[in-house]
């Protein structure tokens, strides 16, 4: 009995969306076709994923970076609501691949967030830390006065998650994610309060005039005005928080060199203080 001859390949091109669907379906068929407990449980180890990637010609570095990005996405992604088209998603994120080990970059990033955004660590994992705004009185005063013009936009988040994952021996994927739902809720309180004021202002019009429908106008107008102001303020806050994330990653990737005055002060301090 002769082996069946494979059909000749079709030369028609596939667009990117179709290619992604084809590869995803091929991976699904490949996994379910294997006779193993791991395949039946729909879970694969990282080493098995790398083996499959090699079979289809995908570089291990690309797979490790994709795995690092997926692991960085998961902590806050599970808690996300569906994105609001009018207000934008309250969970923001930024990521970058840079030179350095995961432990080194995680430590430097923790120090940057503590110094520039007044954040402190509340949970610590091998490849991830979770931070929140510092609650001390002096910290709150520093953020409110903001003499340095930092903005402290990431301190408006209820939670900031930093994730790191090794791509190869020299490079690391670094990701930041922040949950701004509480900040968005505070902004959205503005139209509610203005609508309440409008109801109080419209009550006399509804009772004392011959046109009771005039009492509806103040809450509608003030509520609409409050909505426009709140949406604009929230979008500005979200945009500034994203810029702050990118700025932190810039400082992590391209450390600032100390000024001559800072170098002089550091040198004097080291010479005057006793060695440890």
Image (spheres, rainbow, N blue to C red):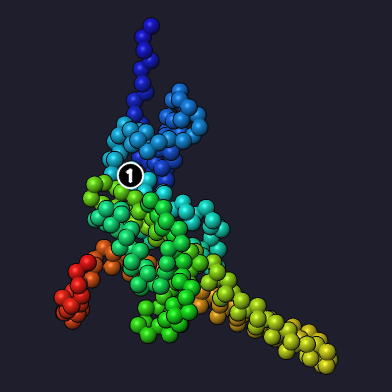
16 shown above or below 224: above
245 shown above or below 211: above
* In the image: residue 234, left or right of residue 4: right
Q: Residue at x 43, y 73 (%)?
A: 153
Q: Nearer the viewer, residue 154 or 17?
A: 154
Residue 119, image quadrant: bottom left
* In the image: residue 262, left or right of residue 229: left
219 shown above or below 106: below
Q: Position of residue 20 (x, y in %)?
A: 41, 42
Q: Residue at x 15, y 75 (%)?
A: 271
Q: Nearer the viewer, residue 9 or 218?
A: 218
Q: Residue at x 45, y 58 (%)?
A: 123
| Quadrant placement of the C terminus | bottom left
33 shown above or below 144: above
Q: Position of residue 224 (x, y in %)?
A: 63, 79
Provide the secondary structure element on which disc 1 rests.
helix
Q: Position of residue 207 (x, y in %)?
A: 83, 89
Give the tally of numbered discs. 1
* Res. 215 in view: yes
Residue 30, image quadrant: top left
Q: Nearer the viewer, residue 171 or 143?
A: 143
Badge 1: residue crowd in 10 Å (few <14, some 14–19, many ≥20): many
**Which residue is labeled 1 in the image?**
64
Q: Residue at x 29, y 40 (%)?
A: 60
Q: Position of residue 43 (x, y in %)?
A: 46, 35
Q: Nearer the viewer, residue 111 or 137?
A: 137
| Quadrant placement of the N terminus | top left
* Res. 177 in view: no
């Amino acid at each position: 009995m002769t082996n069946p001859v494979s059909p000749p390949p079709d030369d028609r091109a596939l667009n990117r969306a179709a290619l992604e669907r084809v590869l995803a379906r091929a991976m699904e068929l490949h996994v379910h076709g294997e006779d193993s407990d791991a395949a039946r449980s729909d879970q694969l180890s990282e080493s098995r994923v790398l083996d499959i990637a090699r079979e289809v010609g995908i570089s291990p570095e690309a797979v490790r970076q994709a795995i690092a990005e997926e692991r960085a996405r998961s902590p806050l992604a599970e808690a996300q609501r569906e994105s609001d088209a009018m207000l934008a998603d309250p969970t923001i994120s930024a990521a970058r691949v840079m030179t350095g080990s995961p432990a080194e970059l995680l430590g430097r990033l923790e120090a940057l967030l503590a110094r520039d955004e007044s954040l402190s660590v509340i949970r610590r994992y091998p490849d991830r830390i979770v931070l929140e705004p510092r609650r001390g009185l002096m910290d709150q005063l520093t953020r409110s006065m903001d003499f340095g013009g930092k903005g402290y936009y990431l301190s408006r988040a209820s939670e900031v998650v930093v994730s790191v994952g090794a791509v190869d021996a020299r490079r690391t994927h670094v990701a930041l994610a922040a949950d701004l739902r509480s900040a968005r809720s505070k902004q959205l309180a503005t139209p509610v309060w203005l609508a309440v004021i409008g109801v109080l202002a419209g009550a006399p019009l509804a009772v004392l005039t011959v046109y009771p429908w005039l009492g509806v106008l103040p809450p509608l107008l003030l509520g609409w005005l409050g909505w426009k102001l709140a949406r604009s303020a929230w979008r500005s806050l979200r945009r500034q928080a994203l810029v702050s994330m990118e700025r932190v990653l810039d400082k992590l990737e391209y450390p600032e060199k100390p000024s001559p005055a800072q170098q002089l002060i550091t040198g004097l301090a080291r010479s005057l203080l006793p060695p440890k």
